[in-house]
Image (cartoon, helix red, strand yellow):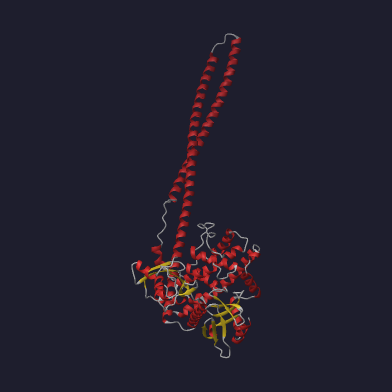
Amino acid sequence: MPFVNMKKAAQASGSSKSFAVKVTTMDAELDFTTVEHKATGKDLFELVCRTIGLRETWYFGLQYVDTKGYIAWLKFDKKVLDQDIPKEYPVQFLFLAKFYAEDASEELIQEITQHLFFLQVKQSILNMDIYCPPEASVLLASYAVQAKYGDYDPSSYKPGILASEDLLPQRVIDQYHMTAEMWEERIKEWYADHRGMSRDEAEMEYLKIAQDLEMYGVNYFQIKNKRNTDLWLGVDASGLNVYERDNKLTPKITFPWSEVKNISFKDKKFTIKPLDKKTSDFVFTAPKLRINKLVLELCVGNHELFMRRRRPDSMEIQQMKTHAREEKVRRQQDRARLAKEKQLKEEAIREKEDMERKYLLLQDDVRKAQEELKRSQETTELLAEKADLAEAEANLLNQKTCETEAEIQRFKMSAVKTEEERMLMEYRAREAEMIATKLLEDSERRAKEAEQLKVDLLQSRMAEKMAKERLMEITRSNVYQPSYQLPELTSDITTDLTEAELGGDLFGVGDMDQLSLEIEKERVEYMEKSKHLQDQLRELKTEIEVLKVEENETDYDRLHEDGIQRGDSKYSTLRQAKANTTSSRVAFFEQL
């Protein structure tokens, strides 16, 4: 961005008494077009905090890059324009966490505070400013997905949606022969386990894990001791740490704030006076005077917060915690109500689907019954036609029989003149008798067939009657309306929720005993969950170890693995460093 004269820029914007500022937070950009020229750093900072609704202001600051290219923090006691900020329009700042909590779950009160910390720590891990082992990176990514998308839903989840997200440090991706789909599958497995977790809960779980990382909340500065050895000085919430040049993970020396009496610098020389009067001062040099100024600023701020944590809460903090507890209860009630509504809605949908299935089955039964009735009717009609035809044939045969008998009588009564005529007549008479006998037999058979057809017709009509009765019975007993409507849930359910449905007794304002019990319960649950997570992390680490690319392993990966082999952790290393006396730590520092 080009440099411009601030006064001319302000006049060009229509006001000679104000200037424009652009502040970028972790999730938004804020534009202030009318900041007064006489505004101090505190004025601008409080304006930003009011705009985003932040009350835990002591963790944050406004960061900028000065005219010489160094990172600096806006000083609250000086005017904004009197500080070494670039003469650009608008003036740009980053709103970031300057100091970190020792225990995020115990100290961070507001949801906005937790959210800003989560976004900043997440970005630091992705940028590889904070070292995170691969298996922990996958776990943290699953919490980030839960915070962004909510509960995992197999029916709406689209494969590949996580592969396009920035969830893992590039160092982790490059370190294994694994495709984006393979990483997504492993993240999804843990993501599915977080069902029912709200956004603020998922973000807090993320911070609980991240704060155990060795580089979490540490500001590193290049320093040298009396022997001119290049070292790192780390400033964090618990004290000062000294690291070897090639290892930012494991401190060689630690000075807790409780053992520090005074901090000062002169030019490039920085002095830390221990509380123990018998111990000599801890002295180091920095390459730039401005580094010593920044170190002192961070030391003072961290020490102030360290002491504040160990004092009783102020009235403001007590009010904020009370409000946070009330908000937590309200959110629990809202989540319980929504969960109940969702459950009832799902039950209604399942009931509707079940009714629709039953309706389809009934429709199928009706269709089959109608087809059976139709076949019975067709069979009945066919049998009736056959019965009529058989009866007509029997009548015709009877008529022919009568005619034949009459002809026989005529033959018998006729005078036979000659023997040949008589024999011929006898032959014809016998033939006629045979024909008459055959016709009589056919007539009897047809008559029997007609009787059988009548019986079949009667049975068919009975079957038709039964089919009609069955169809009427099905129709009467299963009346279904296919346009089934879901019940209105929200308006009725809210008043029906009982305390038991909301999860038992809720916190009352000022009920500290109940709060202590809840906190203890949460701690026990957290310990059990931590053990489960550690088992999952070891399992994932073993699973992906075979896909590891050894040549892409970084120095931090090797240092972390060595620490794991020794059984070291962030806190065990700090305890070990603190176990030494202050004087021995100073002597050790000078010998490095």
| Residue drawn at point x = 33 percent, y = 69 percent | 15
Q: Nearer the viewer, residue 372 or 422?
A: 372
**In the picture, which quadrant includes the N terminus?**
bottom left
Q: In this view, does 553 lie to the left or right of 439?
A: right
Question: Does residue 195 appear anywhere in the picture?
Answer: no
Q: Can residue 144 be seen in this view?
A: yes
Tell me if residue 283 comes above or below residue 398 in the rendering. Answer: below
Q: Where is residue 586 in the image (x, y as percent from the top left)?
A: 60, 85
* The C terminus: image quadrant: bottom right
Query: Residue visible at 56% across and 67% down?
Result: 139
Q: Residue at x 57, y 21 (%)?
A: 435
> Residue 237 at x, y = what percent?
52, 78
- Left or right, residue 275 beside residue 564: left
Question: Which residue of the protein is positioned furthest toward the bottom in this rendering?
Answer: 278
Where is residue 202? Give x, y as percent.
50, 68
- Number of numbered discs: 0
The part of the image, by quadrant, that contains residue 163 is bottom right
Q: Which of 394 and 64 is in front in this view?
A: 64
Eyeballing the image, is 192 above or below 473? below
* Image x and y of residue 262, in percent: 52, 86
Relative vertical location of residue 182 with respect to residue 34 in this rendering, above or below? above
273 or 145: which is nearer to us?
A: 273
